[in-house]
Every structure is written in structure tokens, then in C-alpha cells.
Amino acid sequence: MKAIERVDQFYLLKQLPKATALLDKEGVLLDASCSWLEIFCLPHINKKQSIKIFNLLPEAGNLQQKLEENKSFNLQHKVTHNNDTRHLKSYFAPWFDEKENVIGTIIQTDDITTQIEKEHELSWLKNILDTKAEASKTGWWEYEVETEKLTWCKETKRIHQVPHFYEPTAIEAIEFYKNGHSRNKVAMVFHKAIANHQPYDVKIIIVTFNGDERWVRITGRPIICNGKAVKIFGTIKDIHDQEMAETKIKENQQLLTTLVDSLPLNVYVKDLESKKVLVNKGECNYLNKSEDQIIGKSDFDLYDEEMAKVSREEDLQVMKHLTPIIGKETSITLNGKTTHFLTSKIPYFDLDGKVSGLIGMSLDISAMKNKQRELCNLIKITSSQNQKLISFAHIVSHNLRSHSANFSMLLGFLNSEKDQNERERIIKMLRQASDNQLETLENLNQVVDINTKESETKKPLNLKNNIVRVLQDLSAVLEKNDAQIVNNVADTIEVNCAPAYLDSIILNLISNAVKYKSPDRLPLITINAVKSNEGVLLSISDNGLGIDLDRYGDKIFGMYKTFHNRKDAKGFGLYLIKNQIEAMGGSITVQSVIDKGTTFNMYFNEES
């Protein structure tokens, strides 16, 4: 105990660089180094003081018990002075005398404030990293090549759906990838990373611990030392939801593309500059270009300038005023072919609700237009036929009734007449009435015959030869009336017509020209013919009396219509001609000036 009381002799203790203190068996502080006293902000020790370690370390509740056990131990604690907290770690060991008797305790204290702060910072960073990994569904892993040790972070384990204490091997990790392409792919890129130092970034499928298939994106990068890969560091990201969404989008896009391409429409999308950014197959087929040849092009690149200007003005109207164009009938000429469309254009908006272009749709209605024209022609023909039928019915009902009434009246006169001479006169009148009725019936039969003739009776005829033959048949009439004929028809012109009809047409027109000649001049009849792509135009002109078209223009081709005071005028020839030429698919028009002459123009089409 004498040595213990000589505390002042521990001068060396005070100078120790490591914070050290001595306690007696009761835990009373005997002496300490300056650095230890500084830690606890204590003055130098003197005999009058009695400082117990338990007061300095109040958080160590079982410190006295541990000291009594006379065993070494350590303790972490902290001291606070002037709001400054220092973290400490103290090592306690028994203090022996020269006879190995325990006479107290030696304390050595380290200031671990910096270490604790770094640990806190590391823990904070780890929490931040874990939070980010969880939020981004991205984990990390590390493989040490030499030891074959594989380390997974918390998020990597979560992605694989394994317990937090699970520690995988490299072989086990590879077996998590779906058997087949995914497993083969990851084994190959992992081997290349070690052997060839190649980093990788691939999308593959894993089968989790719970048996779920999920898409992941894995990366790996080798760490090279002395030319060898010593470690592979990589990441794994759960992209299953994203991949499923992208797959669904692709499926929807494919469905939409198939639907749009299958529509019997030309569909396109234009940007604000009227350049096409999307087209369907219908538009490609119409323009006879591939999609790549159309995308980015405007109508000025695809059509003529005038047509492109009209289209651009429509586009601007739709995009500026947000007013759709619905079902507008348009015609586009491309490569010399005109196509009729029913076109609609509607404004196209982006996700912010701003107009970013327009969507156009065009329906080819060329076939419909042709059918419409055919229908109009059919209606026109039907109307004409109907009018003819009405006229025919009128003639039948009126003329035949008139003839019948005349017969009945004459027979009544004959029955009541006693005078023989008067009876013979009535009989003569009956014969004349019978001839007139027969003539009427013959005329009606001709009309019926014309309108029931099949078009197959038409055949190519040399026009000039037929004209010459008719002129020969009329030579006596022409010579008697001193008629001059000027035949300008070329030898090569042919018309498709029934032979009897062509002769009848020429015969009637030339006969009329002679019949209605002017008393003031000799008849001059001029015949011309012109051939074109549409057919043949035959013109027969005379210098006769002419016809007052203002008065009789709408009746000139009517049955039994006459326009001059001639007893032999029956009004049937022009009606017959019109029916004959129309039955051949042609038409006839007339031009006339009173006392100047008349010209009949007949159009023969080229259909056989």
C-alpha cells in the first residue's frame, strides 16, 4: 500500500500519449494522464479529491460488477461538455502488484468520435442507397473471381424473392435465369466478362424463388488488375412492368397498324408543315411508293403544284381554325390517271391539347362515280324510252282510234246510203282509210322493230360506199329536181351500224333535203364526215327552206310532226331516224336557219 500512496511518483503516467487512468479497487480515480483528464475535462488529481469512475460513466449501469470480476473488458460511452459530445471507447484491465495481487484497474480510453461519425455517415449513405435501389428497383451484386464469392444487396435479393439471409453462389445465381435463351445468354456474357474483360448490358428473364417469371436488365463490368479480372461488379434492375407495358404498346400498335392498313381508305398524318409523318398501305399503293419514300414529303413533292396548293390551303384551314373537312369530293390526277376521292381532314392534337398536324382519310369513289354516270345514262335512256313509250301509246290510242272511228262512221254511211254512186264513193273512201291504217301500223311496226333490235346486229360499214349506193337509188329524184350532191366523205371512214339503219338514215335525210328545197334556188346537198377517238361525225347539209327552231325545236324529232305546208309531209322520217341512230348508241342534232338551209349532225360511237 506504500507504493499506492506514492501517487506523485507516477510522473511518467501523466505524459503517456494514450489516455490512461488508474483506479483503486473501489473505483476511485488515483491518477491519470493529462490526455485522459482532458477528455473528461478534469483538473489534476490530488489527495483531497475522491473521484469515482461510476460518476464519470453514469450510462454504464453494471460497471461496478464488471470491475469486481477482475477481468478485462471494453465499454463504449460518450461525454458532453458545452454541447460538444465526444464518443469514447475505454478498455478496462486488472492492475497487479509485484505479487500478482489485484490492486486496482487500468483504463485506456480512445476518442472514437470520428469513427462513429463515419459509421453514421456510412449508415446514412447505405440507407440512401437502399432507398434509391428500392425506388428504382435496381440492385447491385459483386463477384470476387479468386474466391468465387458472390454478394447480393438487399434489393437484389428482393428482386429474386429470396430471404434476406440468403447467400448465393455463382452457379445458383445463374440457375435463377429462365432455362433456355436467358440462362445461356447470362452464362455466355458472364464468361466473356471474366475471360475477355467485356462488359455487358442485357435484358433477360429470371424465375424467382417463388416461381414468378420476371424481366430484368442486368449489367456487368470487370475490374482489371495486372491484366486479370479480379472482380465483376454489376447491377440488376426489375423492368418487368415496363417490359410488359412496352409489349402491350407494341401489340396495340401492331393491332392499330393492321387495322389502319386493312381499311379501304388512304390514311395519312401530316405535321404542321403538311409533311406526312404516317401513311397506311392504301396511301403507299395509290402513290406506288414505299413508306420511306413518302414519310417527310409534302404534297408539293408528290403531286403537281396546282393540286398541292389546294391541298395546302385546306390543311391550313383545318389546323388554324380547327374546323374538320368531312366528305369533300376531290379529284387527283397522278401519272395521267384521274381518281375521284371522298376526302376528310381533321385536326390532330398532342398530349398538351395543342394542334400538331392533321389526320387525313380518302375513299376512292372512282368506281362509284362510274356507276353513277352509268346510272345517270341509264336514267336518261330510261326517261327517253319512257317518253317514247308514252308517245307510242298516245299514237296507238289516238291514231288507231281515229282510224277506227273513221271506219265505223263510213260503214254507217254505207249501210244507210241507197244511191249506188254515193255508195261507190264511200267504198273508195273506205279503201283509202284502210290504206292509211295499214301505213300507220307499218310505221308503228318499224318503231317497235328499232327498239327491240339487238346491238349485235351492228357491224363495220364503209360510210362512203353506203352513201354512194343510196345516191344511186335516188338518182331519178335527184336528176328530176336538178339537185347537186357534194360528197366529201373519205374512202377509209367506217361506222359501226346496222346496214338497214344506215341506208334508212341517209335516204331519209337526202330525200327531205330534196322535198323541202327552196323554190328560189336549185338544191345543194353537202355530205361531210370526220373521224375522232370518240367516233364518227356525219353531217348532211342543204340550202332548202330551213326550220324555225325557236318554234319547233323541241318537236323536230317527234312522230307525225310537220313544219311545212306540204300535203305529202307525214312527220315520221325524222322520228324514225332518231330512233335508229339512238338504237346504235349514237345521237343526232340539228342546226337550221329559215330560208338558208339545215344541217343534221349524226354521231356514231366506236363500240362494236
Image (spheres, grey):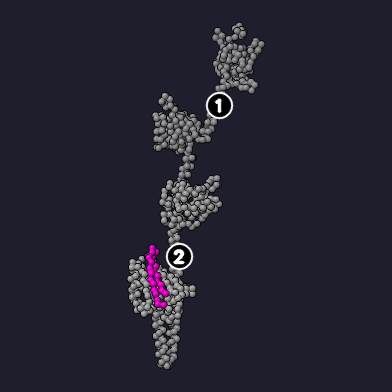
- Given the current orientation, which residue lies at the most extreme top position? 2
Rendered residue at 45%/67% (across/down): 379
- Given the current orientation, which residue lies at the most extreme bottom position? 419
Rendered location of residue 198, percent (x, y)? 41, 31
- State whether residue 116 is above or below residue 8: below
Rendered location of residue 384, percent (x, y)? 44, 70
Q: Can the viewer see residue 171?
A: no
Mark 2 or mark 1: name the one nearer the start of the chain.
1
Secondary structure under the numbered disc 2 in the rendered image: helix
> Badge 2: how crowded within 10 Å, few (<14), some, or many (20+)?
few
Q: In which quarter of the view is residue 187 placed? A: top left
- State whether residue 315 is above or below residue 370: above
Nearer to me, 156 or 307: 307
Give me the C-alpha separation between circle 2 and circle 1: 91 Å
Residue occupied by mark 2: 376
Q: In which quarter of the view is residue 545 placed? A: bottom left
Q: Nearer the viewer, mark 2 or mark 1?
A: 2
Disc number for residue 121 = 1
- State whether residue 423 is above or below residue 368: below
Q: Can the viewer see residue 247?
A: yes
Instruction: Give amino acid for label 1.
Output: Glu
Rendered location of residue 58, percent (x, y)? 62, 20
Nearer to me, 32 or 519: 519
Q: In which quarter of the view is residue 496 placed? A: bottom left
Rendered residue at 60%/13% (across/down): 34
Rendered residue at 54%/53% (across/down): 323
Provide the residue span drawn in magenta.
521-543
Instruction: Give amino acid for label 2.
Output: Cys
Disc number for residue 348 = none
- State whether residue 246 is above or below residue 484: above
Rendered location of residue 409, percent (x, y)? 45, 86
